[in-house]
Image (cartoon, grey):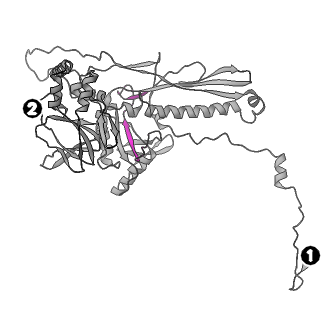
Amino acid sequence: MSVGSVGDEVRTDQAAPQQSLGTAAARNLASTTKSAPQMQEISSRWLLRALPWVQVQGGTYRVNRRLSYTVGDGRVTFVQTGGRVAVIPAELGELPALRGYGDEDALAELAGRCHQREFAAGEVIATRGESTDRVLLLAHGKVEQIGAGPYGDEAVLGVLADGAYFGEDALVDEDATWEWTARAATACTVLELTRADVLALAGRAASLAAQLAGVTALPQQRTNAYGEAAINLSAGHVGEAVVPHTYVDYEASPREYELSVAQTVLKVHSRVADLYNHPMDQTEHQLRLTVEALRERQEHELVNHREFGLLANCDYGQRIQPHDGVPGPDDLDELLSRRRGSKLFLAHPHAIAAFGRELNRRGLAPETVDVDGSRIQTWRGVPIFPCDKIPVSSARTTSIICMRTGESDQGVIGLHQAGLPDEIEPGLSTRFMGIDEQAIVSYLVTAYYSAAVLVPDALGVLENVEISRRH
């Protein structure tokens, strides 16, 4: 002990003796309150909640449609080697004149005759009204379709992007003209295939000549605006006019969707299940988190799967490009205008944020709606649900999906089969597989699902949306 220099003040350099039980020792006698196992991967999964689910007995769903004569409505795929771009020969079969043509040697020669051209932003590629003798394949970039407005000014009719083609009528019609002006919105790489090259090859390849001759018969088919076989009707007649006879023809080979599957085998050691099962059931929580991961994978597949995913199965005629790169009100309006009864948008959270910035820039305030206790932003009354399963490219671009849903409304539907053995949720089952020699208990966890687009205009996609650019 030491004595201070002021008055009788006394201080000590030693800690005071402990007078009660410390907390570290007391914890040995106390019960710990624990949370259930947490998981960051769990998302809102709005797509699974928004889709109407249709029971599929037998594991296959067939979409019967009215017969359609529409051909060549796909996109062309290219390969790039340095600065040189070439079209994959088989992809030329996406052109209407070559749809279904299978001569690989002839297609390879046609692909070799495609000439590469580069266009700078703002440069005119083709001029409306002029004669054309070539089809143009857009390997990279964006092209604006320019027409004449009602008052003589320019009007942007649409935007084409990678994989599109135009001028395809030139391959079979020597009198073909450009219906609109094509102008490069960005730097573009274009491959051109001339009618002269196609006819020169047709003079040597009988199969190609027969293909081109057969295509000329297709326009003689009476179709409606959607390419479906026409139904003969008569209206406005008086007296004893002859009423036309008709019937509704169907597709001979309708598309069928088979249920896809996601599975895993969950393993729990019997010692864990027996001894460490209080206050929480170990098997129950292992299963709960496994089911959450399985449902996350299910939603990912519904968006991205090549066979039935929404992005891959959207009709090319229902894909549009943003007018200014960033997602704006005009772009979402165009998505809505292409279909009746749109029920929802689906967008990556970054795309929703980019759309919000564009609204703020224009001084617009979107409405919100309550969905299952969550406030969801809307546009024109249609909710915009976040979905982090929609991919974002390395160039920071993504897509926005718009759809009509429901079987009765010819929309997009989810497919599953409920009533499975050992089912714990509709379309999801857990089966006990037994105990092995290491005393490990196994459970087979299975989910069956798919999705179907009943008619093409039920689903639309706004592609190549920029999410990082700021004005």
Disc 1 residue crowd, few under 14, some 14–19, many 20+, Cα 10 Å: few
Horizontal side, residue 161 vs residue 206: left or right: right
State the residue position of label 2.
175
Real-space CA distance between mark 1 and mark 2, rounded to the nearest whole angstrom: 113 Å
Residue appearing at x 27%, y 43% in the figure: 189
Q: Main secondary structure of the magenta part?
A: loop
What SS does tag 2 mark?
loop
Asked whether residue 48 is in view, the answer is no
Identity, as a three-letter code, of the amino acid under mark 1:
Met
Quarter of the picture holding the C terminus:
bottom left
In front of the other: 433 or 207 = 207
Q: What stretch is highlighted in magenta?
A: 389-414
State the residue position of label 1.
1
Residue appearing at x 26%, y 19% in the figure: 67
Outermost residue toward the left in this view:
239
* Residue mark closest to the camera, 1 vs 2: 2
Horizontal side, residue 183 vs residue 271: left or right: left
Residue appearing at x 24%, y 16% in the figure: 248
